Amino acid sequence: MKKAIMYGAGNIGRGFIGQLFSQSGYEVAFIDVNMTVIDRLNADREYPVYITAGDHYDICPVKNVCGIDGKDVPAIAEAMAEADVMATAVGVNILKFIAAPFAAGVKRRMEKGIEAPLNVIICENMIGADSYFAGLVKQNLDDAEKAYFDSHIALVEPSIGRMVPATPKEIAEKNPLAVCVEPYCELPVDKAAFRGEIPQIKNMVPFAPFDFYIRRKLFMHNMSHALVAYLGYRKGYTYIWEAVADPDIRTDAIHALSESSCALSAEYGVPLKDLMSFSAELIERSSCRTVDTVPTAYRSFSPGFSTVRSFCPTRNTGLPPRLKNTET
């Protein structure tokens, strides 16, 4: 059986990437420092993913899994030497802590003379996380090892769109490995970043130029979520689904998504109907009653955040933004 490594056994690791690896025929080894999770993975060799749109749960068992202690560097290195594909989902602030163990895996592959490339999907909430992590890893490599890294290791940037609502207490008490996710399960990845043959992963969509998907995530998914939360906060709503059910807020969100759709279509040549369809899907996904509370989703309207930044592609294409005079 082909082998995959999921560095990070949290919500995205278990509830998205690990699930796709398993469904694609891989044995999945999770690396984490949470030994409660690691021990349970090794004991059960499977875990449940609860897929919900808010009204009911469909259970999807994820099989052929195991766990590796995140402090056991030799075990991590040996697993990387045997891996066919890999991903990280540890959080940007943790990347600096896994760089040395990851580098040990690169060295082990080099020692064993492995010529097959290792493609690593970097599932971190940061633009340019691939190059950032590469810099951290290379701090632990000599010149020969850096050359091997550059020619044999590919760090691939994805766009993570799946939302992971809180797992209900009654489900978590039955199995601490359980994770709840929304049905949306598309994984766009940077096609140009792969080395060698692109792995066949269920629901993975290789695309180039990948900047389109990064901007679609920021200026549509993140922007609309932040906008609904901001307007919902002003009206005193607790949950995103309450806010998006408000006719005025829903209309503003639809208008904002329409403007982003027009701008992205003009800039990248993607059919407008596809982006409008994605917009409608985002509105419906936000209606799910298990999605974030308004305070959790709320984002500042400072220039660095999604809602304000989404004005930039609209401005660059000369389209008149209709929401720029929203009251404070």
Image (cartoon, helix red, strand yellow):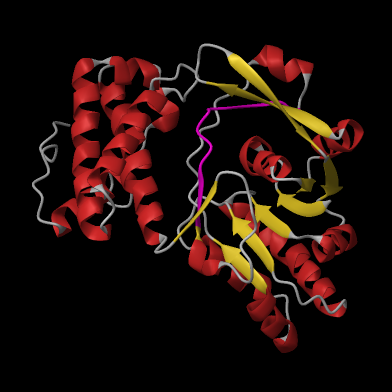
297 left or right, relative to 67: left
Q: 20 and 238: which one is in front?
A: 20
Q: Residue at x 30, y 22 (%)?
A: 232
Rendered image quadrant of residue 18: top right
Image mark count: 0
Residue 53's spot in the image, x, y percent?
Answer: 50, 20
Residue 163 lies in the magenta stretch: no
Check the image and report above or below for 269 versus 238.
below
The answer to if 179 sits in the magenta stretch is: yes
Residue 243 versus residue 218 in the image, above or below:
above
Q: Is residue 90 above or below residue 251?
A: below
Q: In the image, 141: left or right of 246?
A: right
The reply to whether residue 309 is visible in this rendering is yes
Instruction: Give the residue drawn at x 23%, y 30%.
Output: 254
Indicate left or right for 144 with 257 as reference: right
Residue at position x 61%, y 57% in the image: 121
Residue that sits furthest to the bottom in the current view: 143
Res 32 visible: no
Query: Magenta part of the protein: which range?
Result: 177-189
Q: Quadrant of the C terminus?
A: top left
Q: Quadrant of residue 47?
A: top right
* Residue at 63%, 49% in the rendered image: 201
Query: Residue 231: image x %, image y %?
Result: 26, 26
In the displayed structure, does residue 39 sit left or right of residue 50? right
The percent coordinates of residue 321 (x first, y second) are: 12, 44
